[in-house]
Image (cartoon, coloured by chain):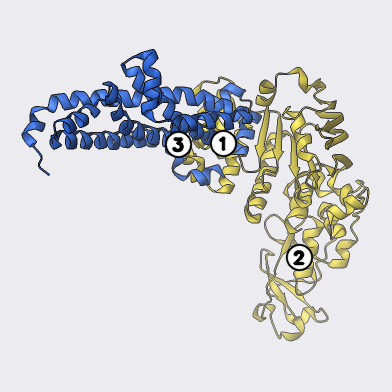
Chain colours: A yellow, B blue
């Protein structure tokens, strides 16, 4: 665990970068420092590996003051990823990744083997090992940056806006892979970003910094959305706070209705009185929507409107389900299982009946720790 | 212009010998210049206040005519090669110091920060990250210094140490054009070959530098 105890950083001239910051970054979790620029979040990050020394207060790793270790040695035990990757232009990809193992005097063969293994881990082909950074795209460079930070298997990773300099599509991809990697590795991660959506998507715990280096709120993403501590935090979180809270509500307890689901072999007359029905095949996979009133005979002959978005029951959040409902011609969200077979449908109003108070008492998707917790950021 | 080809054929050995002396007189000062500029450039980069005075001194030295410098050093080192090489070394500084400083400055901030955060100490960072990244710019400066040194060294013949400069002055005294032309062509060739070798060395040392701007961003 990383502990900040009353950490203050005052620069000569009076600028205060950190103002009496106290917080814990729990083991195996992602703690996100978020805030406006000049809020001190990067400064706070850098006190952990002694790239910044506090004016007062102290930073502890597992109870030990970081100042008890020589900076260079301390840093070799802490992974570090920065915005523009900061790859060494004169070293090949494998040697970039093996930087810390080399500093730790691993033998070259072992270090390079480790580098190749990590390339695969972060989704790079081994054949790129002998390339130089200038031959890689921004997204690939960032992956190398992550691999480099992981090379000596440090228990702690510091990440300073690692995904900010790539385009939104690549960013979302890197974020998803990062979460998947974290699920395997369980590192203690401190992640700095100015993007609240990224914070909500990635963070297990979010610390909001305000200009002047003040820590204004430390909370789970759900609580942050549901109960911002003050106007600054509320303003920083921005619009659609309520809808975004739904990202943390699970769909496993939803009550789905089978009423509007019909096999293609059924006769339209069976569904008389229904505005729309969802036509499914023998495997209950959705084929499309149709209005039974406009069809004579078997539904298989009916003109079908596209199914559109569906949600995976249990895995996806209520937000995804609501999105599916809004986009569906029938106003009904289609819930499917892993195989894509229809479980049932739910109307938008049914979805909102799920408790989403962000009070931590309900079963949240985030608590299950799967990829569905990412919905908040992607659509926001 | 009449060229006496048979004279050239007869004096091949002498010309070769003069060319080798010429190269040595010209290039050793560049090497010494590098040995001075590298640490000095590192210090200038470390303490910014040092750079303006260091550069001013190097530029002022460059402005002093070589002949005047010879006269100054002749009192201490006599009519020896040192009297030619010391001024040439000083001249090379005005190109090499700024190139070392610029080369070190070409290490982008993220790269420097990453090196610190990975746990490189100051010296190791300098040797393994900053100086290697500075190599293309340092070699670019070395090329300019080497070529100008090869052309400047001929003046050394005024104190009897000029390599191919001897043949130029001798040819003038005897009104023998062939010797002047042969020496001049050789000096230009030496400059071209030296430059080509330095370019090759740079390519081999820095295969990563072909898209420098992109890599550094």
Relative to A95, is A284 on the left or the right? right
Residue A372 percent across, percent down from the top left? 75, 51
Question: Which of the 4 image quadrants contains residue A187?
Answer: top right
Q: Secondary structure at mark 3?
A: helix
SS at mark 1 in the image: helix
What whole-number distance in Å separates the C-alpha atoms at marks 2 and 1?
Answer: 53 Å
> Which residue is denoted by mark 3 in the rendering?
B136
> Seen in the image, is B189 located left or right of residue A332?
left
Sequence-wise, which precedes: disc 1 or disc 3? 1
Taking depth in this image into account, of A340 and A231 the one nearest to the observer is A231
| Among the 4 quarters of the image, the one containing residue A54 | top right
C-alpha span from label 1 to label 3:
12 Å
x%, y% of residue B205? 41, 32
Eyeballing the image, is A264 above or below A88? below
User: The numbered mark 2 sits on a residue in which chain?
Assistant: A
Decide if residue A112 is in sight here: yes
List the residue tagged with mark 2: A324
Check disc 2 and report its element: helix, strand or loop. Answer: helix
Q: Which residue is mark 1?
A: B105
Q: Position of residue A293 (x, y in %)?
A: 77, 84
Tell me which residue sits at (35%, 19%) in the image.
B83
Residue at 66% across / 30% down in the picture?
Answer: B117
Which residue extends farthest left? Answer: B6
Whether residue A109 is visible here, answered yes or no, is no
Q: Residues within 10 Å of mark 3 (few under 14, many from 20)?
A: many
């Amino acid at each position: 665990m990383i502990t900040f105890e009353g950490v203050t950083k005052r620069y000569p001239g009076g600028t205060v970068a950190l103002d009496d910051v106290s917080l814990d970054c729990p083991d195996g979790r992602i703690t996100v420092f978020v805030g406006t620029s000049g809020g001190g979040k990067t400064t706070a990050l850098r006190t952990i590996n002694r790239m910044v020394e506090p004016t007062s207060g102290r930073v502890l790793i597992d109870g030990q003051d970081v100042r008890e270790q020589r900076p260079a040695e301390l840093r070799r035990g802490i992974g570090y990823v920065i915005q523009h990757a900061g790859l060494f232009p004169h070293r090949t990809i494998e040697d970039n990744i093996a930087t810390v193992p080399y500093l730790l005097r691993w033998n070259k063969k072992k270090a390079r083997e480790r580098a190749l293994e990590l390339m695969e881990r972060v989704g790079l082909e081994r054949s790129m090992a002998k390339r130089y950074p200038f031959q890689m795209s921004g997204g690939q460079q960032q992956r190398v940056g992550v691999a480099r930070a992981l090379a000596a298997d440090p228990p702690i990773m510091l990440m300073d806006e690692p995904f900010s300099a790539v385009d939104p599509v690549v960013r979302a991809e890197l974020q998803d892979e990062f979460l998947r990697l974290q699920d395997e590795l369980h590192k203690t991660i401190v992640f700095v970003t100015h993007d609240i959506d990224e914070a909500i998507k990635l963070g297990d715990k979010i610390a909001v910094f305000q200009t002047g280096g003040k820590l204004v709120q430390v909370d789970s993403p759900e609580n942050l959305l549901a109960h911002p501590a003050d106007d600054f935090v509320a303003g920083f979180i921005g619009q659609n706070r309520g809808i975004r809270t739904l990202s943390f509500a699970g769909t496993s307890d939803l009550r789905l209705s089978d009423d509007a689901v019909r096999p293609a072999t059924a006769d339209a007359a069976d569904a008389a009185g229904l505005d729309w029905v969802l036509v499914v095949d023998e495997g209950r996979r959705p084929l499309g929507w149709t209005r039974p009133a406009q069809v004579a005979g078997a539904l298989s002959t009916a003109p079908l409107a596209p199914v559109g978005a569906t949600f995976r029951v249990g895995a996806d959040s209520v937000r995804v389900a609501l999105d599916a409902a809004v986009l569906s011609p029938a106003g009904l969200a289609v819930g499917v299982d892993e195989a894509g077979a229809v479980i049932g449908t739910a109307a938008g109003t049914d979805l909102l009946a799920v408790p989403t108070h962000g009070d931590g008492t309900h079963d949240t998707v985030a608590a299950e720790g799967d990829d569905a917790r990412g919905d908040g950021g992607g659509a926001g | 212009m009449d060229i006496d080809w048979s004279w050239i054929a007869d004096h091949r050995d002498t010309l070769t010998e003069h060319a080798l002396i010429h190269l040595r007189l010209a290039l050793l000062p560049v090497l010494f210049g590098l040995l001075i500029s590298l640490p000095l450039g590192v210090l200038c980069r470390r303490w910014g206040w040092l750079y303006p005075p260091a550069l001013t001194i190097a530029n002022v030295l460059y402005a002093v005519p070589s002949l005047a410098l010879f006269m100054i050093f002749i009192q201490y080192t006599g009519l020896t090669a040192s009297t030619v090489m010391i001024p040439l070394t000083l001249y090379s500084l005005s190109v090499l110091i700024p190139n070392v400083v610029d080369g070190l400055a070409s290490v982008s901030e993220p790269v420097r920060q990453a090196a610190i955060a990975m746990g490189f100490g100051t010296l190791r960072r300098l040797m393994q990250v900053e100086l290697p990244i500075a190599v293309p710019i340092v070699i670019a400066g070395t090329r300019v210094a080497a070529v100008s040194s090869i052309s400047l060294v001929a003046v050394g013949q005024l104190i009897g140490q000029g390599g191919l400069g001897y043949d130029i002055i001798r040819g003038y005294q005897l009104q023998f054009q062939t010797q002047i032309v042969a020496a001049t062509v050789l000096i230009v060739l030496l400059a071209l070959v030296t430059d080509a070798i330095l370019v090759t060395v740079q390519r081999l040392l820095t295969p990563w530098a072909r898209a420098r701007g992109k890599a550094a961003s």
